[in-house]
Amino acid sequence: MALAERVKQLRKEHGWSQAELAEHVGADPAQISRYEAGRITPSVEAVVKLAQTFDVSCDYLLVDDAARRPFRPSDDVLGDRLSALSELSGEDLASLLNVLDALVAKTRMKALTAGIS
């Protein structure tokens, strides 16, 4: 019942009523009430909206023992770059994968040779 408890806790931390939270996520106040009571489970889209609104990870809302983390860390440089990869041509993407494979192989070789010395 992580979701019901966490939504209620986070809403109260923000000092919002159920109606105010509903406005933030584009839901009906009755839906928020049912989420908090555990009578209904929100859709995937609703969980994402809740996570974004509260700036917590989706797993924090859904998993009992999940650590509280921000929805998207501000220093997610790698994530930002990875999301832009879909813009690359097939040839450029293949080149990038070759470079990544080479860097991983280099790191592994260093680790192996360090153990031999």
Image (cartoon, grey):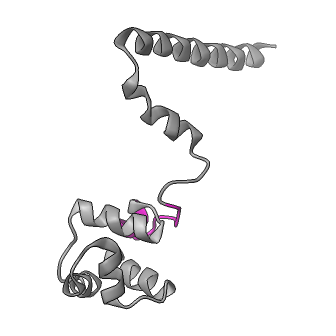
Q: Residue at x 53, y 62 (%)?
A: 69
Question: In the figure, 62 relative to 5: above or below?
Answer: above
For the C terminus, give its image quadrant: top right
Give residue 39's position: percent from left, percent from top: 18, 83
**Residue 65's spot in the image, x, y percent?**
45, 68
At x 40%, y 20%, the residue is 88
Residue 82 point in image, percent of width and height: 47, 33
| Magenta range | 59-70
Q: Nearer the viewer, residue 20 or 36?
A: 20
Q: Position of residue 4 (x, y in %)?
A: 31, 80
- Asked whether residue 4 is in view, the answer is no
Any magenta on residue 7?
no
Vertical order, 94 against 2 (above or below): above
Q: In the displayed structure, does residue 74 sit left or right of residue 36? A: right
Residue 77 visible? The answer is yes
Main SS of the magenta segment? loop
Quarter where residue 51 is shown: bottom left
Q: Is residue 65 magenta?
A: yes
**Frontmost residue, 68 versus 63:** 68
Q: Which quadrant of the view contains residue 113?
A: top right
